[in-house]
């Protein structure tokens, strides 16, 4: 027997339909999931034919794409039979301009009003044109734009491959702005200084929803709300709160105010930047890296890792580079102090400077504390002529006190460098302080060859350059001398290419 619907049932059904209608209204057909494109073209995105019909788009139409952080770009739409109805296919360059990844959601809108451009201004990114000479327009830009009718959007990055190189360009300005189509009669300006990579990365770091930690569930609701709506549910706003995750994020981005007065850097020097010195590199790895990467081995053998090392040898042989490289390999901070920087004419100030340096090293742990020209502040006590107030002796005593206060749990490794190990106070070299001495010699022939290769590894070198001959002809040269030779040769090449 069939039941007869009552007035109550009709009311509940009507309410259910209203709720469903509200939900359906939020699911817009032009919001699609990002997928990888089969065609590596910076100007093309692909949709299924059914989706193009639904959005009233035709093959070759220009569309506006909206991604994260209110980023927009323009592209030409094509049909792809292998594309799902809820997907949009685009290459890496388009995803970069929209600040999205595979699986993110973007919106697609027809843009019939984008016309041909009168002029556009594009500039290369500096690190993609290093060592590149010649006419960028003829080699890269002209073949890229000729008869292609590519749409451009102000602020976009696009890549061009030619002459076995990939060069990145940024769209600085378009007329009309902010988008236009580059036609055969569009004037392409490319004059100006190349854009620094750091400036472009700063633009990429604009704050958006992705930069807020700890409220991902609430943000997922906000992201579904149409920005064109005037109102947002009060319950959503009331549910937002500062969480512990927010504080962890803030602590990771902030540094103690004490560190802001000292240059604390994370070096980008790698072992590849240092030619030769293979035995020295091995010793440093055993002294510094092994305790960090394999602490269980030291516990097994009941051994305390070394807390410091002294580099000595002729000037210009790479002592500072080695210290920076080992800090980079251990992913540690790096503080470099020149010995004379600690000395002042005021009574007690020099010792206070020493305490401050060690305090900042402990605050920046894990940290490599590098004392350059150690002989200027650590001469044998009692042997400094004219030191009536005993300032030099007090500085040494303070350094010894701070070194004894360091242990393996502080995660601070001390490296000293000197050309005169014979005049350094012997107390600094006893076990538990700078107990490991490593001699940094002048490079031999094989090391000189490695230094030449390390210095020129990012430089285009002509085939007639015989590095083996150069390494044989530079007996007695230090690493700094060889670096100067490479720099002078590069400067001459730059001068010849300009003139």
Image (cartoon, grey):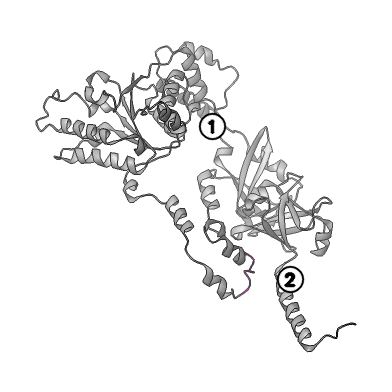
Q: Which of marks 2 and 1 is in front?
A: 2
Decide whether residue 77 is among the magenta residues. Answer: no
Q: Is residue 196 among the parts visible in the rendering?
A: no
Residue found at x 62% / y 34%: 134
Q: Can you tell which quarter of the image residue 159 is in?
A: top right
Q: Give the range drawn in magenta.
A: 223-229
Residue found at x 56% / y 35%: 130
Residue 78, position as x, y percentages in the image? 80, 53
Q: For mark 1, what is the residue?
A: 498
371 on left or right of 200: left
Task: Please report whichever mark, 2 or 1, sits nearer to the chain's N-terminal start.
Answer: 2
Q: Residue extending furthest left?
A: 388
Asked which secondary structure carries label 1, the reply is: helix
Q: In this view, does 257 lie above or below 392?
A: below
User: Contact (CB < 8 A) between labels 2 and 1?
Assistant: no
Residue 160, position as x, y percentages in the image? 67, 41
Q: For mark 2, what is the residue?
A: 24
Residue 282, position as x, y percentages in the image? 45, 22
Q: Residue extending furthest front?
A: 1
491 on left or right of 425: right
Residue found at x 53% / y 16%: 467
Q: In this view, does 64 lie above or below 409?
A: below
Q: Can you tell which quarter of the image residue 340 is in?
A: top left
Decide whether residue 228 is among the magenta residues. Answer: yes
Image quadrant for the N terminus? bottom right
Residue 170, position as x, y percentages in the image? 60, 48
Q: Is residue 119 among the parts visible in the rendering?
A: yes
Q: Can you tell which quarter of the image residue 133 is in?
A: top right
61 on left or right of 1: left
């Amino acid at each position: 027997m069939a039941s007869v619907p009552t007035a109550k049932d009709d009311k509940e059904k009507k309410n259910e339909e209203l709720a469903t209608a509200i939900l359906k209204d939020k699911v817009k057909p032009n919001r699609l999931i990002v997928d990888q494109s089969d065609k590596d073209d910076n100007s093309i995105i692909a949709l299924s034919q059914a989706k193009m019909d639904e959005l009233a788009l035709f093959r070759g139409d220009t569309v506006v794409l909206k991604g994260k952080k209110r980023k927009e770009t323009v592209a030409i739409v094509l049909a792809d039979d292998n594309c799902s109805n809820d997907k949009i296919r685009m290459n890496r360059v388009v995803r970069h301009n929209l600040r999205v990844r595979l699986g993110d959601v973007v919106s697609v809108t027809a843009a019939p009003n984008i016309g041909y451009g009168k002029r556009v201004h594009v500039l290369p990114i500096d690190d993609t044109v290093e060592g590149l000479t010649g006419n960028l327009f003829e080699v890269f830009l002209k073949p890229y734009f000729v008869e292609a009718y590519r749409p451009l959007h102000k602020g976009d990055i696009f890549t061009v491959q030619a002459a076995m190189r990939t060069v990145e360009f940024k769209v600085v300005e378009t007329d009309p702005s902010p988008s236009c189509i580059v036609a055969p009669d569009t004037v392409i300006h490319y004059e100006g200084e190349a854009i620094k990579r750091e400036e472009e990365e700063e633009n990429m770091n604009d704050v958006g929803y992705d930069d807020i930690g700890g409220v991902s569930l609430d943000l997922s609701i906000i992201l579904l709300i149409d920005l064109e709506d005037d109102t947002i549910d009060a319950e959503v706003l009331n549910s937002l709160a500062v969480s512990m995750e927010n504080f962890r994020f803030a602590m990771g981005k902030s540094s103690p105010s004490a560190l802001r007065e000292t240059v604390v850097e994370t070096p980008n020097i790698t072992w590849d930047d240092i030619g030769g010195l293979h035995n020295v590199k091995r010793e440093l790895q055993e002294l510094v890296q092994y305790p960090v990467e394999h602490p269980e081995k030291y516990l097994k053998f009941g051994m305390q890792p070394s807390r410091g090392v002294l580099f000595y040898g002729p000037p210009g042989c790479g002592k500072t580079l080695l210290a920076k490289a080992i800090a980079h390999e251990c992913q540690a901070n790096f503080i470099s102090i020149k010995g004379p920087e600690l000395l002042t004419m005021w009574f007690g100030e020099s010792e206070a400077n020493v305490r401050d340096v060690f305090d900042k090293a402990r605050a920046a742990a894990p940290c490599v504390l590098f004392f350059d020209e150690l002989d200027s502040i650590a001469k044998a006590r009692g042997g400094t002529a004219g030191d009536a107030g005993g300032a030099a002796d007090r500085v040494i005593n303070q350094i010894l006190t701070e070194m004894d206060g360091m242990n393996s749990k502080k995660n601070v490794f001390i490296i000293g460098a000197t050309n005169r190990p014979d005049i350094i106070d012997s107390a600094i070299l006893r076990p538990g302080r700078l107990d490991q001495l490593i001699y940094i010699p002048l490079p031999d022939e094989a090391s000189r060859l490695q230094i030449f290769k390390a210095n020129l590894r990012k430089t285009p070198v002509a085939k007639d350059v015989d590095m083996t001959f150069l390494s044989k002809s530079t007996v007695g040269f230090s690493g700094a001398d060889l670096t100067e030779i490479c720099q002078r040769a590069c400067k001459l090449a730059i001068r010849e290419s300009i003139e």
